[in-house]
Amino acid sequence: MIRKLLIANRGEIAVRIIRACRELGIETVAVYSTADRDALHTQLASEAICIGDIRSADSYLNMESILSAAIATGADAIHPGFGFLSENSRFAAVCETCGITFVGPNSRVMERLGNKSEARRTMLAAGVPVIPGSEEVILSEERGRQVAAEIGYPVIIKAVLGGGGKGMRTAANEEEFAAAFRTAQKESEMAFGSREMYLEHYVEAPKHIEFQILADRYGHVIHLGERDCSVQRNHQKMIEEAPCEALSATLRAEMGCVAVQAAKAAGYENAGTIEFLLDGNGRFYFMEMNTRIQVEHPITECVTGVDLVKEQIRIAEGKPLSVKQEDVVLRGHAIECRINAEEPEKKFRPSSGTITQLYLPGGNGVRVDTAVYSGYEVTPYYDSMLAKLIVHGRNREEAISKMRSALGEVIIEGIHTNLDYQYEILNDEEFAAGNITVNFLEDFARRRETRNE
């Protein structure tokens, strides 16, 4: 049994984990940087300890400080949340060495799946459909150009150790390849300390579909349906839905079966997501696996009734899954909007400052996951997400109406946000019709510009 859990994160996900622990009777330890001294997660946890200066490298990415905090406070487990060290296999390995339970997969599995080339090989060996791509790590532009010609243009260049859209560029032809490769590799080196790249054939205008899986140490693996994450900007998701209206029951069952197959092939344990691209002909391809809880996990909780964070903790304690595949029934439709501190009218420039007034909606089927409050200081040092607004309705039409209403109630003053932009998307005819691919926001921006001329 986990007695005391340290959350190696900040913001709304730290608050979310603290709440789950409270319900389970587990004490919590919040860690914080000097910029987050008055953050909500530090106030809600049983204990709070400062782990370093403002910079993430000096605090939330500082393994030594976090582990020292865990030892000093007697925490016997660490939950990494998402981002920061959540998919760092070295951090998971050090936790294992120190005898601290890491709430996530073991370090060996994380390392194998975190390396995109290795993950591809694992999935190919398991018979999982994979996008045609390079079978080896690409280090030079010259070799990359050769592989791109073999795969066929357009291609997407990705950092082997990448994530969050960093170290990723597309090239429509050979003329575009050199600049795209150099830019992606430079980003990869800066963000992940690695020049290792790999290439895939670029699937044009697909849907981005991810399946939520849960796996315990006894070989039980289930999926909890899918999320449509196609509304994204620069590979960063903005709006997510569950389930995906484009999937028939047959296709959902097939993709879910493959997701479970993929997790079993990797020897996976805990919560994770299998990411697919779905083309216009109903063909789907494995893209990557995320070895952590996802930002958009609440919409799966809404349609299944399963508390994913509690399940993560149960699995980490060595308990079997509390739900079987036959128990998973998708009910209704859920949508999540990410409310960010940014200015859409100025190329989504991040916004910082003090929130002078705050009102967040509630009511039947409305959920807000956030760590902000009136008087909260939004700093420029971390991710710009302020809150996640989640709604659940009987069907997609009702969920859209509910989200429009909820967005219209939100008041955040003192800083700029993307609230109005989100509201426009929810009122867009193409969005309402479900005509959504990963190119949706580009097309929406063009329609918006035409309307405003």
Image (cartoon, rainbow, N blue to C red):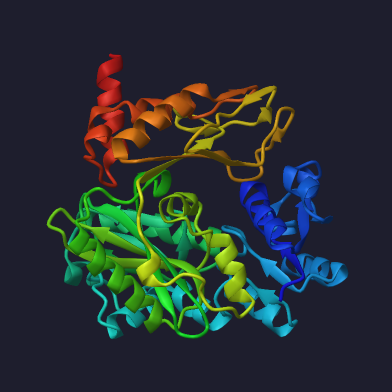
**Which quadrant: the N terminus?**
bottom right
Q: Position of residue 264 (x, y in %)?
A: 39, 81
**Which quadrant: the C terminus?**
top left
Q: Would you say 258 lies left or right of 19 here?
A: left
Nearest the eye: 349 or 278: 278
Q: Residue at x 39, y 66 (%)?
A: 327
Q: Would you say 439 lies left or right of 15 here?
A: left
Nearest the eye: 115 or 80: 80
Q: Which corner quadrant of the image does residue 319 belong to?
A: bottom right
Q: Residue at x 25, y 46 (%)?
A: 437
Q: Is residue 368 above or below residue 80?
A: above
Q: Would you say 34 lies left or right of 417 here?
A: right
- Camera sees residue 140: no
Q: Is residue 247 above or below residue 85?
A: above
Q: Is residue 367 above or below residue 427?
A: below
Q: Which corner quadrant of the image does residue 106 belong to?
A: bottom right
Task: Name, please, the residue furthest toward the left.
Answer: 281
Task: Name, please, the residue furthest toward the right.
Answer: 72
Task: Name, please, the residue furthest toward the top.
Answer: 453
Q: Position of residue 19 (x, y in %)?
A: 67, 53
Q: Is residue 60 above or below residue 263?
A: above
- Camera sees residue 185: yes
Q: Position of residue 183 (x, y in %)?
A: 41, 55
Q: Position of residue 146 (x, y in %)?
A: 23, 71
Q: Which corner quadrant of the image does residue 76 belong to?
A: bottom right
Nearest the eye: 378 or 406: 406
